Image: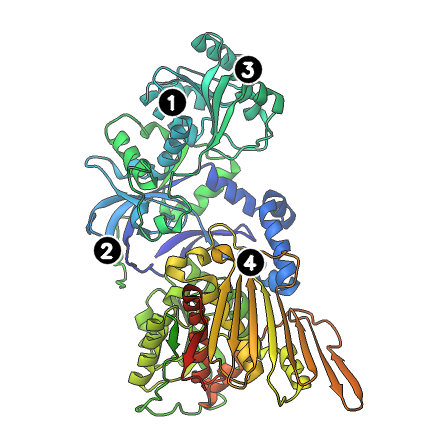
Amino acid sequence: MKQVVQNYKSGELAVLDVPVPGCKPGGVLVRSAYSLISTGTELMKVSEAGMSMLGKARSRPDQVAKVMQSVATNGVPATYRKVMGKLDSYTPLGYSLCGVVEQVGTGIDDVKVGDLVACAGNEHALHAELNWVPKNLYAPVPDGLAPRHAAFGTVGSIAMQGVRQGEPQLGEVALVIGLGLIGQLVVQLLAAAGVRVVGADPDPVRCELAERLGAAACGDPASAAVEAAVAELTDGHGVDQVYLAAGGGSNQPVELAARLCRDRGRVVDIGKCRLDLPWNAYYEKELDVRFSRSYGPGRYDPEYELEGRDYPIGYVRWTERRNLACFLDLVARGSVDVEPLVSHIADFDDAVETYQRLKDGELKAVAVLFRYPEQKEEAGEAQAPAVAVPAVKRPTGGAPTPARSAKTPVRLAFVGAGNYATSMLLPHLAQRDGVELSTVVTTTALSAANAQRKFGFAEATTDLDAVLDDTSIDAVFVVTRHSSHAELTRKALLAGKTVFVEKPLALTEDELAGVLAAVEESGNDRLQVGFNRRFAPLLQEARKRFGARTGPASLRYLVNAGRLGHGSWYLQQGTEGSRFAGEGGHFVDTASWLLEADPVSVYAVATSGNEDLQVVLRYPDGSTATISYVTTGAAGFPKETLDLIADGKVLRLDDFVRASVFVDGGVGRKRWVSSRLPKARDKGQSAELAAFIKAVRTGGPMPVPLESLVATTSATLAVQAGLVGGAPVTLARAR
């Protein structure tokens, strides 16, 4: 299928061939009929992409701050790879469309194949021939409403949410500053609610359009016409509400709002304009400044948008989906007229030219629609206190993996192509001799296309089954969200593939048992989990310098994990597990590797709110490892520090940039310190991948024994049981 994309680094716009998205549970696959260009938001994004790197940085200071924090935590090279990887990728455009349901996912019963729906979301209602849309981001189109009019649904919901924030009352007077697409819709919604409206915009054509659509008067904000109209309609008191629907860098809108608003009036920001509030003006009138967040309640909440969890109507009357349905109803009943807003309808194939004309100012428009071709291609079908470490039953059937010729490339498939895969794994594999990147599989079409372009995959698809059925693929990398790891690993093992799964292997004991059942059933135990720290060259050298030990050891591991940003999927504990369940295996594995054993018990305590954890692991020879996993530390402090103490020796690791070993001997003291700082923090990914590829090529043992992977996973899962039970958790069957 085809999709409109932009490269944020170069500014390039393209209509790209990408795989058809899969139809996942909880949503529908929609074939687009019309999609709407947001001439404000989208053109701002297009313009930003054409800026220099310095210009991009100035326009997004929030992102610059994140980059600097990443440099402090991960170092310059890793941050550079991550940032450039994001910049030099195709990003989607679009967020408002109407189309026909082509496939219905499980759990959906309110629409059927062939129904017309309006769709929302900058990840789901894209300028693409096909989109997968979750339940709360689509709404059925009322009978008789034209598809091109229903395509306004999302933008209409944005305008509606802004109006709701203003709480207009019958007979009030409102001022709308900025009469672009959103402003024109706000004018109509206010007029439909019995509010008299004054509009302000420097474009006389837009002013005339707003007056035709219900505004009492409109004019240039720099002229006296707007102020005179407000004075006449309000007897000189000022308007009850001001809606800021303008963009740009001028502070004129907020100054005009203060001047023309009545005492204790309301100012609602809908657009993205400069907001240097003149303190005296806003203080003296005690103005109520409000923000309108996109389409309404539910926006940016993954449980609402992605998991389909609705808010009870008695508590949240107007959600994203209810706003969408309400706007469609208003248009269908003629209370809002969007047809006069349609300045241009372009064929979808002419998308790049259309954007360029808009950017250059050749095409002056309030709203532009893409019309999709009637010729349709078939969419692809897709379809407690004591914890026992599961016994690893070695395969009874199946032949060992044969050794391969050194000249035969190892063919790899990737399931998932997110940040970690593209910044920490694929760069090490793309240029490795003897490796062929065969296929990349993702649920979203564009991420697969990006990975294919950047790393040279032969194919990109959303069809996992086809990859698992491909006998030419030697190994499958599972680099998806945590909740899918166990099931994808199970499927790949049953398909006879060698599997590399990023941590965690499983989020529950049942998931872990399912993976081990697949090993037994298939006769395939070729599995590696991405516990990379044991492969870090600096830690390997420090362990060698530390040498053998005779007595029990004490290990202390401080992980300064830091807080997650709002909206991170790591916070979705209901589906993705706790943070420690997701990444704690790294630290358990590192401790067990250094102590050369698997733990026999786990004791865990947490601060109030479970923000910081103390996890104590006990080992068969009496050694202990204490992992302090904290989120409340200073961001500038190193992320990982480790001390291993035994037999008069101390090994110290400082965030994978420096290591030292101190030894008290019979003839004095010895000390080794890594000679110089490395160019980058090397946490072992490259060496881990080399060991994995070697095992696949030669048919030799996997880099980490399966028993150790299982023991680490069980110990990580036991932390939650320990927190609930408040007592040590015994791990049975530990070696």
Q: Position of residue 180 (x, y in %)?
A: 45, 29
Looking at the picture, does residue 555 appear above or below residue 248? below
Q: How is the image coloured?
A: rainbow
Question: Closer to us: mark 3 or mark 1?
Answer: 1
Task: Using the numbered discs, state the Cα–Cα distance from disc 4 to disc 2 in whole angstroms.
Answer: 37 Å
Q: Specify the farthest residue to the front.
A: 727
Q: Mark 4 or mark 3, which is nearer the start of the sequence? A: 3
Q: Would residue 429 be found to the left or right of residue 15 on screen? A: right
Instruction: Assess disc 1: are there few (<14), some (14-19) or many (≥20) residues with their C-alpha within 10 Å of its C-alpha.
Output: some
Contact between labelled residues 2 and 4, with CB atoms less than 8 Å apart = no
Q: Position of residue 27 (x, y in %)?
A: 28, 53
Question: Closer to us: mark 4 or mark 2?
Answer: 4
Task: Using the numbered discs, state the Cα–Cα distance from disc 3 to disc 4 in whole angstroms.
Answer: 54 Å
Contact between labelled residues 4 and 3, with CB atoms less than 8 Å apart = no
Amino acid type assigned to the residue bearing label 1 in the image: Pro
Q: Would residue 490 be found to the left or right of residue 730 on screen? A: left
Amino acid type assigned to the residue bearing label 4 in the image: Thr
Looking at the picture, does residue 707 appear above or below residue 659? below
Task: Say which residue label 4 marks.
Answer: 631
Q: Position of residue 53 (x, y in %)?
A: 63, 50
Looking at the picture, does residue 47 appear above or below residue 735? above
**Quadrant where the image shows the C terminus:** bottom left
Amino acid type assigned to the residue bearing label 2 in the image: Gly
Task: Using the numbered discs, state the Cα–Cα distance from disc 1 to disc 2 in whole angstroms.
Answer: 38 Å
Task: Say which residue label 3 marks.
Answer: 223
Q: Of 42 and 606, which appears nearest the observer?
A: 606
User: Which residue is rendered at x = 40% and y = 61% of the image?
Assistant: 576
Report helix, strand or loop for mark 2.
Answer: loop
Question: Closer to us: mark 3 or mark 2?
Answer: 2
**Quadrant where the image shows the N terminus:** bottom left
Task: Say which residue label 1 marks.
Answer: 168
